[in-house]
Each structure stands twice: as C-alpha cells, then as structure tokens.
Image: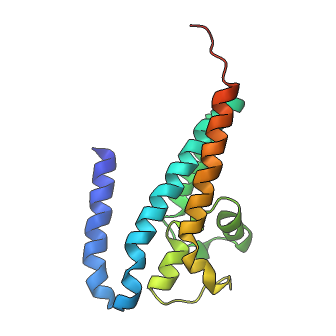
C-alpha cells in the first residue's frame, strides 16, 4: 500500500501540474518516455544492488546508498547539488536521466551546469546500457553464488 500511495500521489500531482505549466505539445511526448526510462533505470540500480550482494556479503548499506539514496536524490532538482555529484549521477550512475535531463527538455530550460543539450534525449540509451550492465552483473553473481548448504 505504501508504494501504491506514493505512485498515486505522484500521478495526481502530475495530472494537476501539467495543465498549469502551459507546455507545448511538442514537448509533452517526453513525459511518458521519462517515466518508462526512470522505471528501467531504477530497476537496473536495484538489480545491481542485488548483484553486489553476491560479492560483498553483509554489505547491504552499499546497495542502499545507490537505491534509496538515489531515490531521495532525484526528488530534488540536481542544480542544488555540487557539479561533481551531478556529473557522477549523469555519467557514472545515470540517475540524472530518470527525471532531470528529460525535465529540462519538457520545461524548455537551460542546464544550469552547462551540460550538453543532447543529454536531454539520452534517457533511453542510459536505461538500456544500465539494464545491460545490471543483467551482466546479475549473471556473474549467479555464477559465483555458493549456497550455505542450509
């Protein structure tokens, strides 16, 4: 119920906010793509966190830093963070492609950090690449897994 409530709240806020923004219809197409790519990116981050558990036993904090920490990070505009962190969540762990870069396109805003314009359209690429890395990491973890025997 908790996750459904968060999803329902986000859907209501989006439904109320969109008409108020006066967006050009030539930019609204990015919103469903942004949601779909965000789903793939976060699913991949969670899968990578699970795959890390095969190698780093008793280290769920490392995975939580990226999964739950990334979720909290994307709740705020990335311009409130330092440029090094923004570059990290753009080029290392691509959380900027969940909502920040596509939203800059939808809202017709310049990137306050001066990152290239083409990044606004790179969410599908980031999602596919991260999903591939997560799948490879998961398969590698499964191959190395040794049961406790219980």
Quarter of the image holding residue 146? top right
Locate the N terminus and report the quarter of the image it occupies: top left
On the image, the x and y values in percent for residue 86 come to 67, 70
On the image, the x and y values in percent for residue 10 come to 32, 64
Is 90 situated left or right of 40 in this image?
right
Quarter of the image holding residue 15? bottom left
* Residue drawn where x is 61% and y is 8% of the image: 149
* Residue drawn where x is 55% and y is 50% of the image: 44
Residue 96 drawn above or below residue 132: below
* Residue drawn where x is 55% and y is 69% of the image: 123
Q: Please give the count of numbered marks on the rendered protein.
A: 0
Residue 20 drawn above or below residue 143: below
Instruction: Out of 115 and 28, give the one closest to the viewer.
Output: 28
Quarter of the image holding residue 11? bottom left
Locate the C terminus and report the quarter of the image it occupies: top right
On the image, the x and y values in percent for residue 79 come to 60, 77
* Residue drawn where x is 36% and y is 92% of the image: 24
Is 55 situated left or right of 33 in this image?
right
Residue 93 drawn above or below residue 48: below
On the image, the x and y values in percent for residue 54 come to 66, 30
Q: Is residue 80 visible?
A: yes
């Amino acid at each position: 119920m908790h996750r459904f409530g968060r999803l329902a709240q986000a859907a209501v806020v989006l439904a109320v906010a969109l008409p108020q923004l006066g967006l050009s219809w030539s930019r609204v197409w990015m919103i469903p793509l942004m949601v779909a790519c965000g789903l793939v990116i976060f699913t991949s981050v969670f899968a990578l966190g699970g795959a890390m558990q095969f190698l780093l036993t008793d280290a769920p904090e490392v995975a939580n830093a990226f999964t739950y920490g990334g979720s909290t990070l994307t709740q705020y505009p990335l311009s409130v963070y330092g440029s090094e962190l923004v570059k990290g969540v753009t080029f290392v762990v691509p959380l900027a492609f969940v909502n920040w870069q596509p939203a800059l396109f939808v809202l017709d805003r310049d990137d306050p950090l001066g990152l290239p314009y083409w990044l606004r359209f790179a969410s599908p690429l980031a999602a596919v690449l991260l999903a591939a890395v997560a799948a490879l990491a998961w398969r590698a973890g499964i191959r190395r897994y040794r049961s406790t025997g219980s």
